[in-house]
Image (spheres, rainbow, N blue to C red):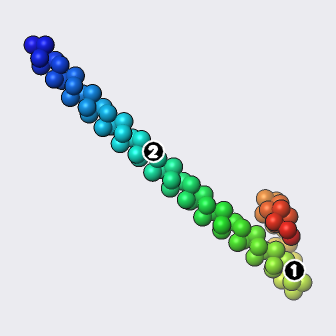
Amino acid sequence: MSGKAGGVVRHFRKNKRVTVAEAYREATERKRLLIRNAGETHNRLTFIAHAMRELLRDDKFILLLMSENLDTIPRKLAARMERTGA
């Protein structure tokens, strides 16, 4: 009887180790993906801030925005443009 119980415990421990290792691999892969996506998002935001900065130097573009009642921009974008050298 003790032989069977020991086998069950060993089997459970082996499966638990595999499960923990798999969970660790999955968690690290999710974190890698999150970091990669954050980098892509950062690059896009930098591109948008630069493009907006360039467009806002054009008086005709500003007049167009004003004529369409679009003469305000989100605060966070304005702050980003200021930080990157508007």
Point out residue 79 in the picture as x, y percentages from the top left corner.
83, 60
Find the distance from the CA under tag 1 to the CA under tag 2. Answer: 45 Å
Q: Secondary structure at mark 2?
A: helix
Of the 4 image quadrants, the one containing the C terminus is: bottom right
Q: Residue at x 46, y 47 (%)?
A: 28
Pointer 2 residue: 27
Helix, strand or loop at label 1? It is loop
Number of other residues with Cα within 10 Å of mark 1, as a class: few under 14, some 14 to 19, many 20 or more = few
The residue depicted at 45 percent of the width and 51 percent of the height is: 29
The disc label shown at residue 57, or none: 1
Q: Nearer the viewer, residue 76 or 62?
A: 76
x 79%, y 62%: residue: 80
Q: With 5 as the anchor, is 82 left or right in this view?
A: right
- Picture layout, residue 84 above or below residue 10: below
- Can you give x and y, in whole percent of width and height, for residue 17 in the image? 32, 33
- Sooner in the amino-acid sequence: mark 1 or mark 2: 2
**In the rendered image, the vertical position of residue 30 relative to residue 49, given as above or below:** above
Screen quadrant of the N terminus: top left
Camera sees residue 39: yes
- Residues under numbered marks 1 and 2 in contact, where contact means CB atoms less than 8 Å apart: no
Image-quadrant location for residue 22: top left
